[in-house]
Image (tube, rainbow, N blue to C red):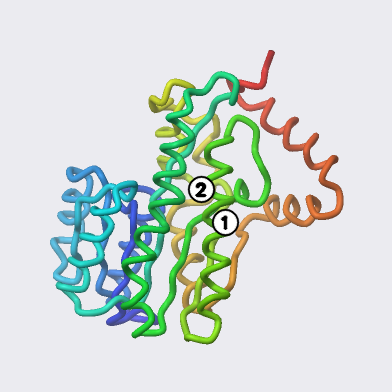
Amino acid sequence: MKTGFNQKTVLITGASSGIGKALAMNLLEQGAQVVICGRDEIKLNEFASLVNNDPNLLIVKADVSIEDDCKVFIEKAVERFGKIDVLINNAGISMRALFQDVDLKVLKQSMDINFWGTVYCSKYALPYILKTKGSIAGISSIAGYKGLPCRTGYSSSKFAMQGFLESLRIELLHQGVNVLWISPGFVASNIRNTALNASGTAQTETPLDESKLMSAEECASRILNAILQRKRSVIMSTQGKLTVWMNKFFPKFVDSQVYKHFVNEPDSPLKL
């Protein structure tokens, strides 16, 4: 199968599992030249083996919270393929703890990965994307539209990401580059298992029934369609669309509904 991304060079951060991995697999099937990065070199190599070391795949071990790692990620992509058509800022981390209990390093780590990782990679990729009149995408969340309880660090980082991408979009409005963010809703992935608790360690379990959520593969397909169509933003879930719309007109009511939703999570930190 070769379609809209055939011969396009696409960079994906945080691609060792979940949505990022599904994006990479889909793109390789379409004939794209794919460059992925992640912190877990073992998982990255496992993915390379899974696709039989496809010559269209380049893996780079990188931590997007480190500016130099992001710079090297971009440089290696250009060195290998000579251009960049699309950058997908997918790397992210979540957290789950009351602000009154959380170690502030958890909020800093959330910002370093979710926001600064997007900024660093976009900064170094932009000169090449300007040449191809390509796209910069950010994988965001409804948490970037509505503050969520016990996710102060996560919501803050996603609000910041969306503000950055919107500003960048307007700066580039007449230069042929598309900038968008996508808010998938709840997707079966590893992000809740690796979400940080109050002390900054992974909670190792998810409060949701992952089997009932959208698959990473379906999510990846929708993200790529949005990029091809050069959308401005996409909210995938009906619940997310309703939340964003109602919050514009009935914010106090939405506050109460969001509280009710999250207080009923298994082992919710909101429960007294």
- The residue drawn where x is 18% and y is 45% is 41
- Across and down, in percent, residue 71 comes to 25, 60
Q: What residue type is labelled 1?
A: Ser
Q: Nearer the viewer, residue 177 or 139?
A: 177
Q: Name the residue under label 1.
A: 183
Residue 50 picture location, percent across and down: 20, 55
Q: Name the residue under label 2.
A: 187
Judged from the image, the secondary structure of the residue bearing numbered disc 2 is loop
- Estimate how packed mark 1 is, as few (under 14), some (14 to 19) or many (20 or more) residues with alpha carbons within 10 Å: many
Residue 135's quadrant in the figure?
A: bottom left
Please determine whether, in this image, residue 204 is positioned above or below residue 42: above
**Does residue 271 sit above or below 237 in this rendering?**
above
Where in the figure is residue 163, as x and y percent of width and height?
58, 59
Residue lying at 28% horizontally and 57% vertically, measured from the top left? 70
Q: Which of 50 and 244 is in front in this view?
A: 244
Helix, strand or loop at label 1? It is strand
Q: What distance separates the C-alpha of mark 1 from that of mark 2?
A: 10 Å
Can you name the residue that lies furthest to the top here? Answer: 272
Q: Which residue is drawn at 54% across and 61% down?
A: 182
Which residue is found at the position 16% from the left and 66% from the top? 54
Q: Which mark is residue 29?
A: none
Q: Which amino acid does label 2 sit on?
A: Val
